[in-house]
Amino acid sequence: MKQLNTFLLLAVLSVAAVNFSSCKKYADGPFLSIKSPEARLERTWRVTKAMSGSNDMTSLFQLVNYKVEFTASAINIVYSNFLSGTTIEKGTWKWAGADKKSILVTQTVSGNNQTTTWDITRLTAKELHASYSSIENGAPVLNTLEFKAD
């Protein structure tokens, strides 16, 4: 009887492990989180790594003290500009779909509204990894950003 109980317990745990691993929301984790995606996203983030295609832009982002602040529906991108001091670019954000794997960031740039889709690959209370595409010199470029909670 004891062997049967042990076998059943192992079988249940195996099935649960397979089900949880197939439900992982973000490619780079976390595996499981008690906090909602909003509770993890809504904070101030500082860039720890920035890539534009194969070009490492991390030192530039860190030089200007680049931060992204998320609130319930607003986003502020804050950085130091050597000529004019601190610059704050205001915008809005919302989830791109019910799966909450991407966000739509809308900002006004040079008088025009621009919406960019950030695909999130990792979202924990302390880390955010996202990527978005842009056009540079007529060619598409994948930009990746890694953030640490401030």
Image: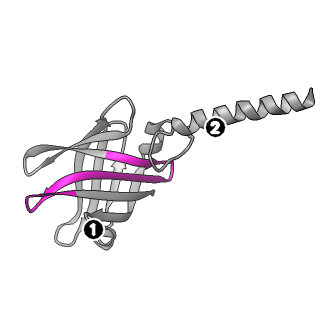
Q: How many other residues sit within 10 Å of disc 1, few (<14), some (14-19) or many (≥20)?
A: few
* Residue 117 on image: x %, y %: 25, 43
Asked whether 2 or 70 is in front, the reply is 2
Q: Which amino acid does label 2 sit on?
A: Ala
Left or right of 113, for residue 36: right
Find residue 134 and report its image quarter: bottom left
In percent of the image, x 33 and y 31: which residue is there? 97
In percent of the image, x 27 and y 68: which residue is there? 54
Whichever of callouts 1 and 2 sits on the residue coming sooner in the sequence is 2
* Residue 143 on image: x %, y %: 27, 58
- Above or below 97: residue 21: below
| Residue sitting at the far right | 1
Left or right of 128, for residue 87: left
In percent of the image, x 45 and y 38: which residue is there? 37
- Above or below 108: residue 62: below
Quadrant (top left, top right, bottom left, bottom right) of the N terminus: top right
Asked whether 84 or 43 is in front, the reply is 43
Q: How far apart are marks 1 and 2 (CA)?
A: 36 Å
Q: Name the residue under label 1.
A: 54
Q: Which stretch appears magenta?
A: 119-141
Instruction: Name the image colouring.
Output: one colour
Q: Name the residue under label 2.
A: 17
